[in-house]
Image (cartoon, rainbow, N blue to C red):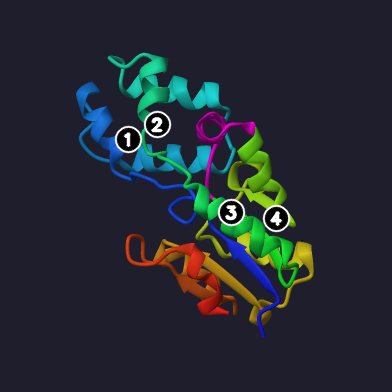
Amino acid sequence: MIKNIILDFGDIFINLDKPATAREMTKFGFKEITPELDTLFKDYEKGLLSSEAFLDTTHSAFPKASKQDLIQAWNTILLDFPEYRLDFLEEFAQQNRYKLLLLSNTNAIHIDHVKTIMGMDRFNRFKNAFDQFYLSYEMKMRKPDAEIFEYVLQENGLVAAETLFVDDTKENTDTASSVGIQVWNLQVGKEDIIDLKQHL
């Protein structure tokens, strides 16, 4: 029996254009994700370096891009947050049947932009619907590492088998499943979080 629900953010609530940043950065010489860039992006999502250090390092790799160019390109991944999903979440939370937790891989620049896109009133409505609101850069951990799931379970006294994790990335749901959590690997474009009740 499911008692707890852990929800991802990107492409679950807010729509994403995942290739957008790479597409935008080609004008500044970007060709592919190198091992160095991959490490940089993951370290930034883990909050292991500041936004300033992240931008400095990225600017060194792409000197044609100003820091403002980099911020704009970085944020192109973030699209809209449909009101119907926020309404659904608030109604679901008000029923108070499940403990609701957010678990998102993100970073300070993206969260600042999300607040701009949504407006602080809508962002706070979103945040307040959850019992716990976990952002990777604040936790110094990121999905799909098992430690982040084990931390959330332990910190909140959750039983893995009584917990459902919803994420659009199979790598993340696979790790959650490996530690005993029930999962729904949501297929973007075919499924929507408003169908959550069918998975409980």
Q: Amino acid at mark 2?
A: Trp
Contact between labelled residues 4 and 3, with CB atoms less than 8 Å apart: no
Q: Amino acid at mark 3?
A: Asp
| Marking on residue 87 | 3
Q: Earlier in the sequence, mark 2 or mark 4?
A: 2
Contact between labelled residues 3 and 2, with CB atoms less than 8 Å apart: no
The answer to which quarter of the image holds residue 66 is top left
The residue tagged 4 is: 130
Q: Earlier in the sequence, mark 1 or mark 3?
A: 1
Q: Amino acid at mark 4?
A: Phe
Q: Which residues are magenta?
A: 105-120
The residue tagged 1 is: 21
From what the image shows, is residue 29 above or below residue 63? below
Q: Can the viewer see residue 30 in this picture?
A: yes
Residue at position x 32%, y 35% from top? 21
Q: Is residue 117 magenta?
A: yes
- Secondary element at image label 2: helix
Q: Earlier in the sequence, mark 3 or mark 4?
A: 3
Quarter of the image where the N terminus is located = bottom right
